Image (cartoon, rainbow, N blue to C red):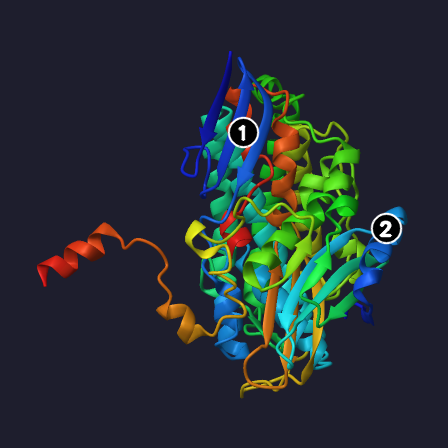
Amino acid sequence: MSYIVPIGPYHPALEEPVHARLYTDGEEISRAEVFIGYNHRGIEKLAQQKNHIQTLVMVERVCGICSHSHALAYAMACESIAQMEVPKRGQYIRVITAELERLHSHYLWLGIALHIIGHDSLFMHTWDERETIMDILEEVSGNRVNYGMVTIGGSRRDISDETKTHILEMLDFIEKSNLRLRDILLADKTVALRTQGVGVLTTADSKRIGAVGPHARASNVPVDVRKDAPYSSYDDFDFNIAVWDSCDVFARVVVRVLENIESIKIIRQALEMLPAGPVNLGLNKLPKIPAGEYMVRHEAPRGQLCYKVVSDGGQNPKRVSIHVPTFKNAPTVPTMLKGNSVADAGLIIASIDPCFSCMDR
Amino acid sequence: MQEYKKISITKDEVVPVARRMREAGVPLAMIHGFINDAGKPNISYEYEVGSGIESYTVDGEDVLPSIAGIYDLAAEWPEREIMELMEITFEGVDTSQRLFMPETMIEGQGHIIVTPMDELIKKNLGPKEPAEEQGKEAE
């Protein structure tokens, strides 16, 4: 018997609205379609009405998880047009915040994945440990989300020696807990039964559709902007790209927990090598961005984030284009759903770590 | 600073460039559009070549060939997005269903990037919310 099963736009397994239509043959999904746009806020249009600093503040609100990534990418695009050289200390602080953001984003997703597969005890444990990372972010920036750490020309806040020592201590705790989480996830039967062989996206399909970030790396595609096109001093740090070759939901879990280890390594190096000097260029007035256009890429927690800014030399940007990782990864969902059971659809959709607020803008 | 190179091409070169890039295994980062000073669309295809971006730009064309047949969904979604946000057509792209805009804002009623803000505010964006109607009745 064939059915059409709608999922969403509002569904318990989805953090944000999206609509999937599953064409089933019994329990098996034979075809699927994804519909987006339920969170479209016209942010790109609004950016044209605001000056560069107002736009910087606004794009930080595109997403509640990777807010720093949006501000960083927008600032980098403006700085590239204006040929500004951000002070090294400012670049390092940007990296520290970006990696803390990646850690909390990955912990958040791991918790959600565990909740969906029914492993609620580990879900609560994971989110409890995520709080440590949120505490660090709060100590560094004063906020749990929308950190406001970026300004055009550098970082808005410095990291004191006292905070630095405290973060390093906290990192020891996070590293220990992450290694324990890794060992559990690699060995746990519940995790294996619900995720192995589920929602497969082959390496060829990943490349064909253009998946990015941890989603691509879990399909054995070693792409990472931090390595492929280093920016903000990422080439100063020693870290590896985590990849896994099973191409299923399990691989997406493993890649993220392995990436946490690399993020901790980067933060530790950045803190230990934190250069002396100013954190920004001291541009107290509205920065002058000359006419020009530039596109930058940043490895956000969910993958490659692209910002293209067009300036006509005025106070407001002429155009801001935002292409987020979910816009690249969401088209892979129908391919992953095909041949799986309806019961796994929520998990498979969630396995791309979707951010529909980011995607819809 | 990441490298960024802009290269102007004609409408006829869009597909050959995309084919050459695909054969070389170059990912398509994004397709981007804005309205130039003459009021015409400026569309650029941003390819990740090495550690930089090569931006192949077509200026002043209202109709462009689709490269969805070459770059699959990596091109189809951005093309559909630009069609909804700007007055431009990518030949061969299926636009029977919306991508971003509400149903009431497709078919030429949306194009929010090219429509001035004051006109956009005046547009009828579909049926009013029940709460809004009730509020009016109470007045």
Q: Quadrant of residue B47?
A: bottom right
Q: Which mark is residue A158?
A: none
Q: Residue furthest left?
A: B138
* Amino acid type assigned to the residue bearing label 1 in the image: Leu
Indicate the secondary structure of the residue bearing disc 1. helix
Q: Are marks 1 and 2 on the same chain?
A: no
Residue B27: % across, % down = 79, 51
Residue B55: % across, % down = 78, 66
Q: Residues within 10 Å of mark 2 (few under 14, many from 20)?
A: some
* Amino acid type assigned to the residue bearing label 2 in the image: Arg
Describe residue B27's horizontal placement relative to residue A345 as left or right: right
Evaluate whether residue B113 shows in this view: yes
Does A195 sit above or below residue A169? above
Separation of residues labelled 1 and 2 (CA atoms): 35 Å
Compare residues A316 and B31 and report the one nearer the observer. Answer: B31
Q: Which mark is residue B19?
A: 2
Q: Quadrant of residue A156?
A: bottom right
The chain containing the residue under callout 2 comes to B
Residue B36: % across, % down = 65, 77
Indicate the secondary structure of the residue bearing disc 2. helix
Q: Quadrant of residue B59?
A: bottom right
The chain containing the residue under callout 1 comes to A
Residue designated by label 1 = A347
